[in-house]
Image (cartoon, coloured by chain):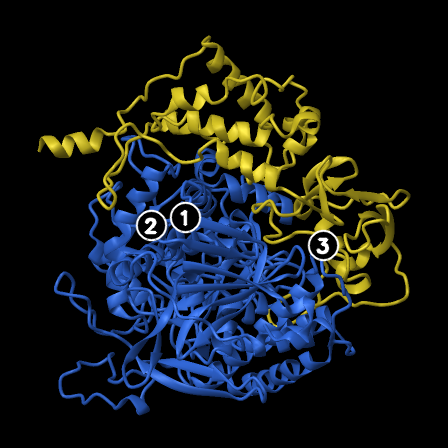
Amino acid sequence: MVPSRGKAYEIQHHQHDCLVIGAGGAGLRAAFGLAAQNFSVALVSKLFPTRSHTIAAQGGMNAAIGSMHDDDWRWHFYDTVKGSDWLGDQDSIHYLTREAPNRVFELENMGMPFSRTKEGKIYQRSFGGGTIKNGKEIAKRTCAVADRTGHSLLHTVYGYCTKFEKVDFFIEYFVLDIILQDGEVVGALAMNLDDSSLHRFQAKNTVITTGGYPRMYFSCTAAHTCTGDGCAMATRAGIPLQDMEFIQFHPTGMYGSGCLMTEGCRGEGGYIVNSKGERFMEKYAPKAKDLASRDVVSRSMATEIRQGRGVGPKKDHLYLQLHHLSPEVIRDRLPGISETAYIFTGADVYTQPVPILPTVHYTMGGIPINYKGEALIYAGSDCPIPGLHAAGEAVSNCHGANRLGANSILDVVVFGAAIGHNIGKKFKPGDKQPDLKDNLCDATLDNLDKVRNSKGCVAIHELRASMRQTMQNKCGVFREAKLLNEGNTEIQKWFRAFEQVIVTDRSINWNTDLMEALELQNMLQTAIQVVACALNRTESRGAHFRDDFPKRMDEMDYSKPTEGQTPKPIEQHWRKHSLSIADLKTGNVTITYRPVIDKTLDDEVATIPPVPRVY
Amino acid sequence: MPLLRLTSGTFGQLRTFATSATLGKRIKTFAVYRWNPDEPDKKPYTQNYEVDLDDCAPMVLDALLKIKNEMDPTLTFRRSCREGVCGSCAMNIDGVNTLACISHIDKNLSKPTKIYPLPHMYVVKDLVPDLSNFYRQYQSIEPWLQRDKEATKGKETQLLQDVEDRAKLDGLYECVLCACCSTSCPSYWWNGDKYLGPAVLMQAYRWIIDSRDDATEKRLSKLKDTYSVYRCHTIMNCTRTCPKGLNPGRAIAQIKTLLSGIVKKQPPILDPAGLEKQAAQN
C-alpha cells in the first residue's frame, strides 16, 4: 500500500490456494472441483452466482449418451470441428466431446432435473449442427431440462458448491485487474461494491471465468453484465486475446427486446419463414435446413431481409413459426420461451409466429487456452502462463470460428472440471506462495482513481450507446472493408473519448455508476480489438463473413482433391488464430497469429481434415 | 402490447431513443424510494422522476435504466438479464413484489408508479436489499442431491427417473430465488430470522420430493421445529406475488402433510440406480 494515497486506497489482503473470478457455470464448477481436493478457494464475483448469465441458457448441453438413438462422441467431435469451420483446436474438441457424457452424468448425480424419456433416461433433442455418422442424419444429442437448461445447471452447481467449506464466496466484488509478479499471475485486486474497499486476493492459481462481451453490441441476447471484464483484464496484463473477430449472431433473438428464443424451438420442429410464408432455409441448407449451424442460418436470414422478403411494416425481420407443433410438445419442451415470447412480443406461440432477428449471442473470442484450461502465450509454441487458467465464454479454444448450439454450457463444465484436475495434478493445498511487493497494483489504483474522479463532458450512457451502435452497424453479420474502416475510425474515437467521461455518483457505497464506467472501459478495450481483427481478416470463415472476401482461405484448396497441392505457408493463408494485443495509451492494436491445433489427443479419434462447409 | 418503435438501420436494429429536454406527450411519474448510506442520518425519501413513455421501452426496468442513464446516475438497483430469469431486479412496484424487467409500466398517466425495495429487508442503498439472510437460509436446506450410496467421483452413471416422477418437480425447479415471495410474507417479516420463508421452503420441498433423493427423513427432520415451517399460516401472499407463476404456498402445505405423516413420499416409479444394476449384472 502506498501511504500517500490515503485511507480510501487501503488494501485488505487475502490468501488462498486458488482464486476463481466469476461465478457462473464455469467458475462454480472450477471452484468446487478444487475445493473437493482440499484447495482453499476464493470465489469472487460481481454478481450473486445464480444471477450470472449462465442462467439464461435455454436449449441444452450436447453429450453422446445415446438416450434417443445410438450415438458416438466421435460424431459430436466431427460436428464441432466442422461447426468451428476448422478453426477450433482439435485436441480441445477431442477433450470436450469425449468428456461430455461424464460431465452430464455428474450433473445428474448432483441433482440436475433433466427432462426424461419414457424409459426414464435423460431426454435429448435435436440442435443446430448436430448429426450422426459424420453428417449423415440429424442427431438428438442435446440433453435438456425443458428450455431452462442453463437455469437448472447454474442452480445445480451453485447448490452443490455451497457444500464446500473451502469455497469462500466474495459476492458483489468487482475485480479490477489480475496481478503479476515476476511473470507469474499471483492473484487479483477487487473492489467490494458494498463500501468500495479494496481487496487483494493472493493465490497460487488464478482462474478467469468472467464470461463474454456481447454487450458491446446494441442488439444482443446477453445480460447487462456481459461486458468482457476478464478479457480486458488479460489485455491490460499484456496477454494477447484470440479470435476476437468471431461474434455469433443467434438466428432467433426476439425482435425489439433481443431476448433469446432457444434453438430448441427449431430442434422440436419449429422453422423460420419469410414474408412469403416460405421455409427459406430449405434453399440455403438443403440437408440441415433450420438446424444448420447458427452462422449459416443468421446469414441466410440477413440475406432474405436484404433481398426484401422481411416481414413487418419495415420488412426488417422474420418470423419463427411454432404453431404447427402439437400443443403438448410446446407445453412440455418449450414452456420458458412460450412465456417470454408473450411478455416481450405479445405473440402466443400456440397460434401466432414470433418476430425474430439475428441477434448477438456469443463471443467465440477470448483468452487462448489449451485442453487443460491453462491460459497461453504463443511465442513460436504454446507457453502456459504460470498461475493462470481460464474457462467458459471468456476463452477461445474449441469453438473456433463458430460455436455449435448446446456446446457452451457443456464447455463450461468440461473445462471448469479440467482446471480442477490440472491444478490438482500440479499443485498441493498449502503450497508456499511468494511475498508480494507493494507496488504491483499501482497502475490499477491509478486507473481507478482517475475513473472515479472523472469530471469530463461525456455521459457514460451516451458513450456506451455510441460504441454499441458502431459495433452493430459496422461490424455485423455481413462485413466489408468500407464499413469496417468506418467502424475502426469510430471505435477508436469512442476509445479515446473515455478520457472525457464523467462519473456523477461519488458515493462509496454501491456505486453502480462507477462500476458501469469500469465495465464500459472494459468493453472499449475489447471492442477496438474486435474491429481491428475483423478488418484484418480478409477471408470468410464461420461467423466472420466478408462481402468483399467471401471465400474461406485455407492452406490448400479443400474443394479440390488435395493430392498434388502444396500447403501454403502460414503467412499466405487464413486458417490460423488471430492474436490481438492493444496498446491502451494509443488504441493501436497489434495482430499476430497462432496455428490451429489439428492433432487430436490420441488415437481414439482421428483428426478431421478441412472440407468445404456445407449443411 | 405495442412493439417498440423503430427507425431503419442495417436490417432493423433499434435506434437509441433520442434524449430531449423538452417533454413529450405521455409523461409518467415514477416515485422511487431513495436512501443513501453515505448520509445515514438523512431519512429515506421518495424522489419523483418524469419519464416520457413515448421515448421509453415498455418495462419498469427500462424506465429505471432511462432515469439512471439520463437523469440521475446515482439511482441504484440490481439488474442483469432483463428477461425475467436471473431474479436480480426484484422490487416492490405499486405495492406488488415482482421483477422490474417483466413488469409492464402502468400507462395510466394520472397517477405515479411507486417503486420501493422489497419490504421489511435491510436496505443497502436505494432499491438494493440485503439478501444475506435469505441466501444463508437457502444454503441451510442442503440444495443438492443426496443418495444413500453416493456415486464414485468420476464414475457416475445415469440415474433413471420416470416422466411422472420428473413432473413432480415442475413448478418447483423454475424458482429464480428473487425473494419476491418471502418478502411478501408477513410471517417472514416478523420472524424472518427463524422462519425459512416460502422461497427456501419450496426449494426444500423440491429436494424432498425428487425421486432420486434418499435423504427425505433427514430433510424433514430438520424442519420439525416450531419456526422453520410452522410460521406459515397460509396467508398466500407468496403465490399471489410470484413473478414466475409458481405456487410456494402449496409446496409448504405439501411439506406440512409430509411432516405430520398424513402423506408419505412415494417410492420412485423407476429405480434410480436401475442402469447401474443392469450394468453390474452384465
Q: Which chain is blue?
A: A
Graded by Cα atoms within 10 Å as few (under 14), some (14 to 19) or many (20 or more), the crowding at tag 1 reads many
Q: Are marks 3 and 1 on the same chain?
A: no
Q: Position of residue A103 (x, y in %)?
A: 30, 48
State if disc 1 and disc 2 touch (CB < 8 Å).
yes
Say if residue A275 shows up in the picture. Answer: no
Left or right: where A608 falls relative to A474: left
Q: Quadrant of residue A443?
A: bottom right
Q: Position of residue A238 (x, y in %)?
A: 46, 81
The chain ID associated with circle 3 is: B
Task: Check disc 1 and report the residue beneath it.
Answer: A166
Q: Nearer the viewer, residue A182 or A575?
A: A182
Q: Nearer the viewer, residue A131 or A161?
A: A161
The label on residue A38 is 2
Q: Residue at x 66, y 55 (%)?
A: A194
Label 2: which secondary element: loop
Q: Are marks 2 and 3 on the same chain?
A: no
Left or right: where B204 falls relative to B214: right
Q: Residue at x 69, y 81 (%)?
A: A499
The Cα–Cα distance between marks 3 and 1, rounded to whole angstroms, is 39 Å
Q: Quadrant of residue A152?
A: top left
Task: Check disc 3 and report the residue beneath it.
Answer: B62
